[in-house]
Structures are given as C-alpha cells and as structure tokens.
Image: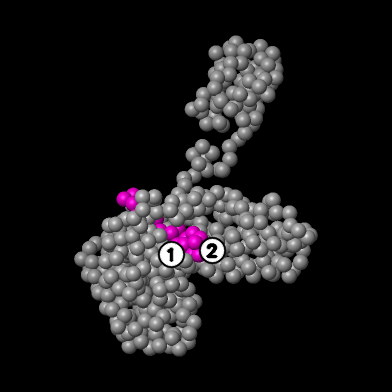
Amino acid sequence: MGVEIVINPAPEETRVALIENQILTELYIDRKRDRGIVGNVYKGRVVKVLPGMQASFVDIGVERAAFLYVADITTATDEDQPPSESEPPEVADEGEGADEGAQDREEPEDETAKAAPRRGRAHRSIEELLKEGQEIVVQVTKDPIGTKGCRVTTYLSLPGRYLVYMPTVNHIGISRRIGDEAERARLREMMMRLRQPGAGYIIRTVSEGTSEDEFRMDVEFLERLWQTIRDEGQRRSAPALLHADLDLSLRTVRDLLTHKVDRLTVGSRSEYDRIRQFVGTYLPNLVQKIHLYAQDEPIFDRYGIEIEISKALGRRVWLKSGGYLVIEPTEALTVVDVNTGRYVGKRDLEETIFKTNLEAAKEIAYQLRLRNIGGIIIIDFIDMEKEKNRERVFAALSEALTYDRARSNILRISELGLVEMSRERVREDLMRVLCDGCAYCEKRGYVKSATTICYEIFREIRRAGASREESKVVVTVHPSVANLLFDEERSGVELLEREYNKRLVIKADPHLHQEQYDIMMV
C-alpha cells in the first residue's frame, strides 16, 4: 500500500498519522486543552508599537500578545495593484507552512496562503501604519512556541479544497508542484474568469485536472466565508475571535485526502460518520476511500505507530548497517551526529564511512520530518577524504529533503564534515508536544554526580567546622550520595571527623534531589 492516513480520535486528543509505504512519516497531534490557533482570524487591538524592531504587539484575547511585523501589514497599495501574472517566491510548494508572513498550519497542508507579493511596504514604517489602541483584523500564522507569543499577519488567507482565497491582495498564483505548462495556463485562465475583481487566489496542487464547476463552488464558498468574517468584525469589538479553522480531522481531509491516498482509516464511529458527511459534501468522489476501523486492538497499536512514536523521542537512532545517529536538541539549534557504531565495513575505512554517511543522510531527512525539527540544524557527518563521496552524500541528503513539506535551506558539506541547514519551524516539534523539560535536572539535561556532591559536602563542613563547637554534624542527602559516603568516600568522612573532632552522621532521604543536601551542627 502506498499512502494511508490513520486518524485516532479520543475525547482528550486527536492524532493523525501519515503512512507512506508502510512507514510512519508524519504525525499530527491536536489536544483539546491546548488546541492550536493557527489559521484563526481575530479582531485585535494594538497594545504596543516598537519602532526599533519595526513590529507591534497585538492583543487578540489569548494568553500572550501576538507579534505583528511591519512586512505582514497590508496597505492600500497591495489591494490596488493589478493581478500579478507572475508567481512570486512566496507561493508555496505543497505543504509548505508559514514563513515571512505567510500562513503556516498545525496540520498537513498544501499551499495555504503563502502570502502575496509585498508591494508598497518597503518605505512604510510601523509608526505610519499602526497606532496604539487601533483595532485590526489579523490571522495567526504561527502558534506560540516556548515563551514566544503567536505570530500574526493582516494578509488573510482562507483555504478551500482547491484554492486559497486572499481577500486583501490582488494576486493569482499557482503551486509550483503543478509542472505541466498547459495545465497551469488552463487553471490560470479559469481562475481569471471566476475571480471577483481585486480578489487574490492561490491555486493548490490538488487543483490539477479540476473542472470549472469545482472551482466555482470553491470560489463561492470562500467568498461567503469572507463575508461572514467581515460581518462578525463589524459587529464585535476587539479582542474577538472572528473565525476558527477546521479541527485536525477535517483539515486532514481537506488538505491531504487526494487520489494519491489509497485509504483513510478512522478509529471511531462518530468521527467516521462526521468525516464521511464532510467528504460526501465537498469531495463525493473520494468517499470510498474512508474506512471505519472496527477491531478491538487500538488503531495505533495495530499499525505499529505507538512503537514508532516512542522511538522518535529517543536521542539515539540506529541505522540498518549498525551505525547510528545522535540527535541533540538545544535552545538555539539541533545537532545531529553520525557514528559508524557496530558497522565495520568490508573493504577500507573510506568506503565504510561513505556508506554510513549515505545511509545516515536519508535517515536524517526522515527524522527531521517525523520529529518536526525546525530552526537551525547542524549535521556532523563522519569525515570523508574524497570530494566525490562528500558530493554524493550531500546529493542524497538534498534529494531526501525534497519529500518534506517544510521548506529547508542547506549548505554543502564543509571540510570538517559539517552541514549547516535550516528547516521551516511551523509548529512545536514532537519532543516539545509530548514531553516536558526535566524538573529533576532543571532542564539542563544532566545532574551533578554523587561524587561531586560528596566533595561539595566536605568543603561545606570545612567552611563551618573550624568555627563551631558542636560535637556532631548531621548530613542529610539523597540515597545515592549516602551510599557513596558510607562506601568509597568513607575515608574522607573519617578524615573530617579526626580533623575537627566531630562525629559525622549520614542520613538518607529519598525525597531529596540528588544535588540537594542539608548540613546541621548539633
């Protein structure tokens, strides 16, 4: 089976898995308690203008104020321009998310509103465009990540099945993934006939082969939706939610269910009925692809997805050859280290290294996609002496990244064997979604060793011991430290007792952090 979508709905969360050739390639999670807001349209109020950053903070009614950059603010010039016949860089490839003011999604997506050309803004400052207290309509393009608030734009984009409607920009674009020039021309001509004057559209990849009637239905639906949003905006005062995007299940159907998908399997009767109704209304020719999973075994267990999720949280990834990757996320970037591991090769060292790197390149691209790792990424390949081998590994990595929906920029392998790249960060990575920072180590990723704590205790006793006349010192520590003081460091304890003529009493407390201890002179 080629491509399959598996939806696992539950009252607390919905999970969607994209499986290609029986391999889990993408995972999306929508939790009811912290559901993403990407795609939502709000009426907000400008609370602060920052001339030094050419940006502003906008209150949209969520926990943290949204961030609005000057380049993401529409002007009258944008709307007055004649429709663009060229395809700007911002028009998305299939599944690209938001970047530079375009819309990115929390779900699988196609060309959702890679915003239109930014004409007429180069010489406008944030102070000219916005004032504190001003009410504006914005759309969320990035969910809050870490301590940062969400990012918003006034370039609104409303995705339909075949089109993305951009009511604030006079522009027509076509997905670059539609490669046939005759088909591109046909779609553009059809769109020019159907569009209202001044309206902007992106023609999505799934539009290839679409009839004019299907286009017309999408256009009418999106225009009605925009009119509803405008009416809500006039009726309500800021901050207010004007439009919420579809939930994860229906977004998946809208954006991923195509003729290339062999099967969409749903794990609950109620969700199955809801999806079939949606597909029957908007995509009736795809209804036969929807299937209900009716077995007792949990659906993600049946497909082996739970095991793959557990593996995706590990820092070490084994390669089939016996080599392995170490994936280390940090605050500023993610580092991927390639190692030969158990692989010893057959002929010579250079060939062994080359084959390990070649296999690693494909696995790295897969792991970045599965884990949804974004931002700056440094890949430390094993050093290769031959330039030809370096080029082949780089080509393998570049090719593997072409299957990724998120955009990436990649530099060639350096003399040190390093690859610097960036990958579009459209939502929280899998680790952040499923895990919390370790409270035990205070998110450092490590704790001081028991030996280090022992020696800290010795120094602390020496600081206080000489100036006090108490005859006994009671030291309360974590059991691992206590065991060390009773065993390997017993000689140090006895030396302190003789030096200060005091008796040291060691007490173990399992409730203490390994780095915590208490010293009492009695």
Three-letter amino acid code of the residue under disc 1: Glu
Nearer-the-camera pick, 295 or 315 = 295
Q: Are marks 1 and 2 in contact (CB under 8 Å)?
A: no
Examine the image and state in which quarter residue 411 appears: bottom right
Residue 294 point in image, percent of width and height: 34, 55
Q: Give the answer, above or below, for where 344 lies relative to 176.
A: above
**Mark 2 burial class by Cα count in 10 Å: few <14, some 14-19, many 20+:** many
Q: Give the answer, above or below, for where 457 lies relative to 185.
A: above
Secondary structure of residue under mark 1: strand
Residue 13 point in image, percent of width and height: 36, 52
Side of 325 relative to 167 (left or right): right
What residue lies at 46% left-to-right and 45% top-to-bottom?
Answer: 436
Q: Which residues are magenta?
A: 9-27
Side of 438 relative to 361 (left or right): left
Asked if residue 20 lies in the magenta stretch, the reply is yes
Residue 352 point in image, percent of width and height: 73, 59
| Residue holding disc 2 | 423
What residue lies at 50% left-to-right and 64% top-to-bottom?
Answer: 21
Three-letter amino acid code of the residue under disc 2: Arg
What residue lies at 62% left-to-right and 33% top-to-bottom?
Answer: 449
Q: What numbered label is drawn on residue 4? A: 1
Secondary structure of residue under mark 2: strand
User: Disc 1 or disc 2, which is closer to the eye?
Assistant: 1
